[in-house]
Image (cartoon, grey):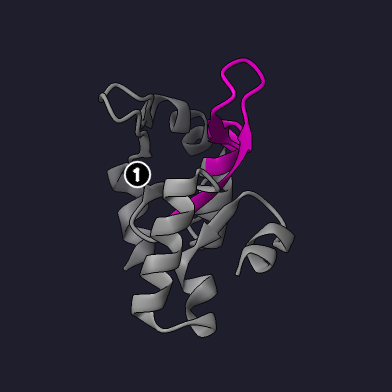
Amino acid sequence: MRRSIANRPGTVILRSELADMASPTQLSRILSRFVDEGRLIRVGKGVYVKTRTNRFTGRPSPAGTLESIAAEVFDKLKIQFGQESYSRITMLARPPRSPCGRWSIRVGVEFLGVLR
């Protein structure tokens, strides 16, 4: 599983991409362990991001910018967005404010029509 994740192009991993490799319970355990080990960061339900070690803090950080991660998530989920929507990604994303240091990407109302 580690090799499969490491060899995948891009920085975003969807749980659905790994569904055929293990049972749902095993997959949950594996992904949870990778998050605990700092190999992945969970940014949403079923959405994970590869990490790299931050050279200043020595801690894992996302292996891409917020904008590139959001664009890759939208691309993988087949959500179409134009330049105007892309510029709103930065405004919709929230940096870590909680003690656990999590951040997430909030999708605006105009994207919900595409998902249905």
Q: In this figure, which residue is indicated by the disc labeled 1?
A: 107
State the image coordinates of residue 81 (x, y, percent, origin top left). 51, 47
State the image coordinates of residue 115 (x, y, percent, origin top left). 36, 64
Amino acid marked by disc 1: Val
Q: How many marks?
A: 1
Q: Residue at x 56, y 42 (%)?
A: 69
Q: Secondary structure at mark 1?
A: loop
**Per the image, is 65 magenta?**
yes
Image quadrant containing the C terminus: bottom left
Could you tell me if residue 39 is visible in this image? yes
Determine whether, in the image, residue 44 is placed left or right of residue 56. Answer: left
State the image coordinates of residue 36 (x, y, percent, origin top left). 42, 48
Give above or below for 95 relative to 62: above
State the image coordinates of residue 98 (x, y, percent, origin top left). 25, 25
Q: Residue at x 38, y 39 (%)?
A: 105
Q: Residue at x 63, y 49 (%)?
A: 11
Residue 51: image quadrant is top right
Could you tell me if residue 41 is visible in this image? no
Image quadrant containing the N terminus: bottom right
Q: Residue at x 32, y 59 (%)?
A: 113
Give above or below for 110 relative to 29: above
The stretch in magenta equals 47-69
Give above or below for 77 relative to 19: above
**Per the image, is 76 magenta?**
no
Q: Farthest top residue?
A: 56
Q: Residues within 10 Å of mark 1 (few under 14, many from 20)?
A: some
Determine whether, in the image, residue 83 is placed left or right of residue 4. Answer: left
Determine whether, in the image, residue 83 is placed left or right of residue 42. Answer: right
